[in-house]
């Protein structure tokens, strides 16, 4: 059985399971849901502009993202 992105046969984290995420510059461009999250139970993938303000909220799920220097 081959692995398909965003499916249960991968070691992924649940999408939209938390309300706050810390992200680094390596995570840019920032999308919600982020890579590594299940896609089947989430909203459409959108890109969020976090670079200028340093934080952003997803308009679909309300998740808050904070850009941290790591």
Image (spheres, helix red, strand yellow):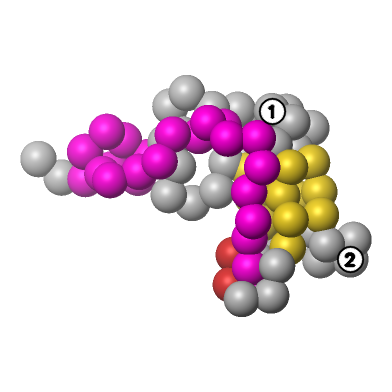
Return the mark for residue 48: none
Give above or below for 55 relative to 11.
below
- In this rendering, the answer to whether 56 lies above or below 15 is below
Pick whichever of labels 1 and 2 is earlier in the sequence. Answer: 2
Determine the CA span between mark 1 and mark 2: 21 Å
Image side of residue 68 versus residue 26, left or right: right
Residue sticking out furthest to the right:
53
In this rendering, would 56 be left or right of 22?
right
Residue 43 image point, x, y percent: 60, 27
Whether the magenta-drawn stretch holds residue 22 is answered as: yes
Circle 2: element type: loop
In the rendered image, the quadrant that contains the C terminus is bottom right
> Residue at coordinates 44% horizontally, 34% vertically from top-left?
14
Residue 70 visible in this rendered orientation of the protein: yes
Check the image and report above or below for 66 versus 10. Answer: below
The secondary element bearing badge 1 is classed as loop
Q: Are marks 1 and 2 in contact (CB under 8 Å)?
A: no
Mark 2, Cα crowd under 10 Å, few <14 / some 14-19 / many 20+, is few
Query: On the picture, is 2 further left or further right than 62?
Result: left
- In the displayed image of the protein, which residue is found farthest to the bottom? 70
Q: From the image, give the main secondary structure of the stretch colored magenta.
A: loop
Residue nearest the observer in this picture, 23 or 5:
23
Residue receiving disc 1: 61
Instruction: Determine the residue positioned at 83% across, 62% down.
Output: 54
Residue at x 65%, y 35% (from the top left corner): 19
Task: Report whether 14 appears left or right of 53.
Answer: left
Residue 37 included in the magenta stretch of the image? no
Residue 20, by quadrant, is top right
Which residue was labeled with disc 2?
52
- The boundaries of the magenta stretch are 3-25
């Amino acid at each position: 059985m081959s692995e398909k992105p965003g499916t249960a046969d991968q070691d992924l984290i649940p999408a939209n399971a938390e309300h706050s995420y810390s992200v680094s510059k390596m995570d840019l461009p920032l999308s919600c849901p982020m890579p590594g999250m299940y896609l089947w139970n989430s909203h459409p993938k959108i890109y969020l502009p976090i670079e200028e303000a340093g934080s952003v909220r997803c308009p679909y799920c309300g998740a808050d993202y904070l850009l941290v220097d790591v």
